[in-house]
Image (spheres, grey):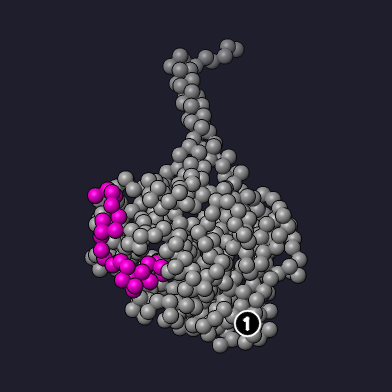
Amino acid sequence: MHAVVPPPAAQTWHKRLGRHLLRFTLGCLLLLGPNLLFFLIWGWPDTPIPPIETATDDQFTADALPASHADALMAALRDSRKQAGLASLSAAISFDGELQWAGATGWADIERAVPATIASRYRTGSVAKPLTATALIRMVEAGRLGLDEPLSQYVNGLPAELQPLTARLLASHQAGVRHYSRIPSWWMGWHEAFSTTPYTSVADGLAIFVDDKLRFEPGTDFRYTTFGYSLLSRLMEGASGMPFERILQQQLFDPAGMKDTAVESAGPMPTREAFYQAANGRYTAAYPINSSAKIAGGGMVSTPSDLARLGQALLGDALVSGAGKAILFTPMALADGRMNPENYAIGWRVDNSVRLLGENRPTLIIHHGGTQPGGAAFLMLLPEHGITVAVMSNSGTRAAREDVQETAYALARKVIDQE
């Protein structure tokens, strides 16, 4: 028998298809390969987290808090870390006007075998936004700036499109300023969220986005944006005549008693945690980012105790007046009257939530979370109960962000159950 030979046209078609598939495969490898390598190195937890003795756990308990309550809170925190498989978890709770409890469990630095303590400092991620917003409102109450005065009144030399923007629009994410680019370059390490570029000033960091077009007419829509907060911090600098770091110290850290909160430095910082991407009991090192371009929206370090102190101060009237808190905590509608999709106020999300106490007990929660490489945080205020809860981790995975929030809920329930 003789083999059947395909006609020349069929042979040519098959060869062309093969060449196209080969080119497509090579193109995908060229475009996706470096990013896959990036995530395998920096985002894929592959090393088991070593066990750590519970004797290394650190805890503070106020004199008025019963020991049994403190033990229950510490046990809940310990269980949350084990179930989530994180390197460490740290939490703090304040009520009755002061810090009542703080606890830390796990590793501050796995490689150096350093346990976490309640003084360990974590990356705040976007929890920096409510901190910035609180400093902003204090400046407004001191008459240093107006929420609805144009950016051009305080800062010169910006593109004409940005000049009419106001502090209120920027702080509520209604200014139209873009967020991080959604399209990474061929190497994920160049993505704006993973920037390693050091900027010597807030003004220098604006170069990343300041010449880009606004995404919508200011006030007509909502777009969550860290860069909008960078521009807000430049406005605050222009209004005060001082660097943003000094504004934070004078307007927030000192008056709120936040002695362990600071702008993050690229160099060594005392008591700062090591940064990991951890989940399910495994970890890898976090990509070494530089946050100098986004201090106001995600470039600070703090402790849960400091965040809980801030929350308790805000539940009182010494830090911000009642009128100021009404501005901070009232979600802002868009120009057409629709509520923005995140119930976002000035630096805070505000919800009547059933996630905390169930369908029959909706609870007012004023909150903000944050995540970035090497850190996740969640801060919430419960005005009806006078309680503030803050939880932080030295892992920046999406799962860690969810875990710190769920841990905060679990701790809050335990406190409310004792009321």
Secondary structure of the residue carrying numbered label 1: loop
Q: Outermost residue, top direction?
A: 2
Q: Three-letter amino acid code at disc 1?
A: Ala
Locate residue 350 relative to residue 412 in the image: left or right. left
Q: Quadrant of the N terminus?
A: top right
Q: Position of residue 3 (x, y in %)?
A: 57, 14
Q: State the residue position of label 1.
A: 62
Give me the residue at 55% from left, 69% from top: 259
Q: Is residue 235 visible?
A: no
* In the rendered image, the vertical position of residue 228 relative to residue 82, given as above or below: above
Which of the pair 263/249 is nearer the observer?
A: 249
Q: Determine if the magenta segment contains residue 194.
A: no
Q: Position of residue 79 (x, y in %)?
A: 67, 70
Which of the pair 206/257 is nearer the observer?
A: 257
Which of the pair 20/266 is nearer the observer?
A: 266
Residues in magenta? 133-160
* In the rendered image, the vertical position of residue 399 relative to residue 351, given as above or below: above
Q: Determine if the magenta segment contains residue 135.
A: yes
Q: Position of residue 172 (x, y in %)?
A: 35, 64
Q: Position of residue 203 (x, y in %)?
A: 38, 50
